Image (spheres, helix red, strand yellow):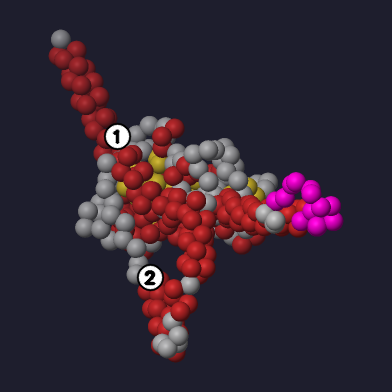
Amino acid sequence: MFGKLYSTLFFILFFCHEPSDAQRKKETLLSEKVTQMMDWTSKRSVIRMNGEKFRRFVKAPPRNYSVFIMFTALQPQRQCGVCKQADEEFHVLANSWHYSSAFTNRIFFASVDFDEGSDVFQMLNMNSAPTFLHFPPKGKPRRSDTYELQVRGFSADQLARWVADRTDVQIRVIRPPNYAGPLLLGFLLAVIGGLAYLRRNNLEFLFNKNVWAFSALCFALIMTSGQMWNHIRGPPYAHKNPNTGQVSYIHGSSQAQFVAETHIVLLFKYEIMCISVMCVAGMCLVMLCFSWLLSIFRAKYHGYPYSFLMG
């Protein structure tokens, strides 16, 4: 009887003690991973990962944090201009989170370059860059964890909204001060003021209708070509497939566009405007010449009843 009791107590203690050790090991491993991620983040707001780091800190459990990864191709031989622009915006977002008062170890930002982690690209069946993916703390990434780059653009503000949708973490995007714009505007105003001062006795050009008409026409062409959409969404100039090298200047969806696409539309509208002006001028010239011919015909054949513009 005591033997059965001892056996029961042994099995109870064994099975109660074993999960406790496993849980302790799991917590220790998780703590080491979080500590390492925090250490990397303290040095760089965007953690650079290769295949080994990706498998250990992103794919392998345990993990209680989200990781937002930008898959890119920044090496010069890849000739991915869009990747560089997206990388700058991604760093703006990561820095905004890193220096925020609400910063925690709940989310991390990382990047995987194709030349440093091609095995990761193959693992995820990824054949284009840049691409943004969210790896949640538990489970596999869903379809909504893939950022719709072609639709939303890669501006830091759009990425911050996507982060908020996936994790409920609100990130206020803070951009570093850019003095190029104010300096350029000040220089332009100084030039205009200087010209106005030099011609202070002859300012008729300010009342020239042709100048204002040309300025209004340029503004209308810029606005109707999609430049405002580019300013709001921040789309890439074009898209280059890092594997095939093919460059796309026209977006395949009606819900998005490239910057190059708006330049093409702007050029076409300018050409149409020029052709339209030439057509109107040509029609006026034909009417004038036809009227002149009729007047000559009337002068040669007295009593001819028809005329046009010219009696």
Marks 2 & 1, CB-CB < 8 Å contact? no
Q: Position of residue 10 (x, y in %)?
A: 21, 22
Q: Tell me how many marks there are.
A: 2
Q: Residues within 10 Å of mark 1 (few under 14, many from 20)?
A: few
Q: Which residue is mark 1?
A: 22
Residue 41 visible, this angle = no
Q: Amino acid at mark 1?
A: Ala
Q: Which residue is mark 2?
A: 178
Q: Residue at x 45, y 85 (%)?
A: 202
Q: Amino acid at mark 2?
A: Asn
Q: Residue 270, located in which quarter of the rendered image?
A: bottom right
How far apart in space, not on screen, are marks 2 and 1 (Cα)?
Answer: 52 Å
Q: Residue at x 40, y 83 (%)?
A: 193
Q: Which residues are magenta?
A: 295-308
In primary-sequence order, the first of circles 2 and 1 is 1
In-image side of 48 versus 280 (left or right): left
Residue 217 visible, this angle = yes
Position of residue 260 relative to residue 196, above or below, is: above
Position of residue 115 relative to residue 1, above or below, is: below
Q: Nearer the viewer, mark 2 or mark 1?
A: 2
Please tell me the numbered disc located at residue 175.
none
Q: Residue at x 52, y 56 (%)?
A: 221
Quadrant where the C terminus lies? Answer: bottom right
Q: Position of residue 133 (x, y in %)?
A: 44, 42
